Image (spheres, helix red, strand yellow):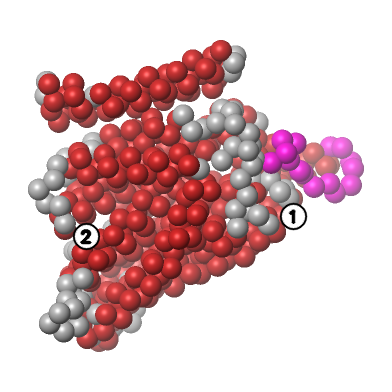
Amino acid sequence: MFKFLLAMLIPLGIFIYTWSFGHWMQIKRKWMGAFFAYALALCSASTTGIIFWRMFV
Amino acid sequence: MKTTTKLASKELIAMLTIFVASNAFLMYPRYASQSALEAAWMEPLAAGLMTLLLFLVMEALLSKFFPGMDLVQVSQETFGKFITLLLTLIVVAYFVFSTASVVRQFTENVLITVLPSTPILFVGAVFMAAVAYIAFTGLEGICRTAYFVQPILIIGILGLCLMTANWWHPLYLFPIWGSGIVRVASGSFAYSSIFVNVLLLCIIFPHAHHPRDFRAIGVVSIVVSTVLLSAFLVCYHMVFPAHAAGKSSFALYELARMVYLGRFIQRLESVFVFLWVTAAIVKMSVTLWGAGYLLGRAIGWQTFRPAIPSLALLCFAISLWKADLLQVMALDQKYLMQWGWTVAFVLPIFIVLAGIVRHYARRGRMGGPHRRMTSRRGGPQHV
């Protein structure tokens, strides 16, 4: 479990970075751009989480 | 960020050549050997010729009906934004899965050959970090890196072929038609997706310093990469018999291990590791950049760069999805290689032909003279 949490640090950072990109798009009222940025952030973080869970837990 | 990158034609040629020729380090020699046996070297020739003809047709149609427009603009003019988004998502998915497959293949390659005790997670993460960094710098960074690497790659491949000359058995190339003309032709067609550079070129050519060089860039990159792949396969098949070649996963490594030019110059695989790692990074950064760029264009992001880390992470995660290399190879051969031509060739031709039909339909409706379509968006915005 500790290994999993440690391995998820960088994906978490990337998730926050992409999520903030989506937020920036939302502020600029680019709704579709914001939606896809949020979707990309969720998709990459969840896929990585599943893979790392399978590997480390 | 609204900057327009301009690239020299020789840089684009270098990038597109490496993009295709780096397949010599991947599973392509194995697939070609399995399908065509002794005639494996004919497969890149036939596929290259077919690609060249298709490219010339595409280039003629684009320059006649849509001068100065790339494929995304043609699609937006023809189908509108929503269908363009769907079509672009198909290409993005192809690029993401392609990058993931190449990452896994190269990671396994490095693990098996030079770093057997290193965890796959670490090697893959370092690979992906380098790829993401180059993709983040944009098309300019990728093309300049490729221009720097190109002579090393060409000299490396040709040098390796010549250094194994003392192992050549020309009789291994007979029977000349290998598994038969039909299987050679079907194999050439099935694995023609290695020339996905045509699709890339149709997207990025407005970034060329002289977009009129579109034809020259395409022709030179297709011809040079075809010659390199064929020359490599001829040498590989003169060193290893066809059945053995069809079982080897890392053709270049196997060939480099065979080098014996005397007691002090032998087994040069450690030298070639740098070559294939560099070429791999260029190839993967092109597909990763392509995924981000197309996504940004279709969605309307002002910059695609913030998506690169997430896309790189996604590729890395997908690359670790399967437990071992054999499963990855099976998926790569079954889906990406054998169906990749639909994305690489059918999709761009479909978009251009649909655009032409719409162009004539509009002209007939308006009853006006023949008028070329031109971009209303003033060319590409962000690279």
Name the amino acid, label 2. Answer: Ser
Instruction: Tell me the number on the disc at residue B364.
Output: none
Of the residues tagged 1 and 2, which is closer to the observer? 2
Secondary structure category for the residue under label 2: loop
Q: Chain of mark 2?
A: B
Residue B163 placement (x, y as % from top left): 27, 80
Q: State the image quarter where residue A19 is shown.
A: top left
Residue A1: x and y in percent read: 11, 20
Q: Magenta part mainly helix, strand or loop?
A: loop
Name which of mark 1 and mark 2 comes first in the sequence.
Answer: 1
Residue pointed to by mark 2: B249
Q: Which chain is mark 1 on?
A: B
B336 over B268 or under it: above or below: above
Between residues B247 and A56, which one lies in front from this camera angle?
A56
> Would residue B54 be visible to someone looking at this image?
no
Q: Residue at x 9, y 48 (%)?
A: B117
Q: Which residue is mark 1?
A: B64
Kindly indicate the quadrant of the structure image that contains residue B5: top right
Q: Position of residue A55 (x, y in %)?
A: 15, 31
Position of the N terminus of chain B by quadrant: top right
Instruction: Between residue B141 and residue A29, name the one nearer to us.
Output: B141
Range of the magenta residues? Answer: B365-379
Residue B301 vertical placement versus B359 (above, below): above
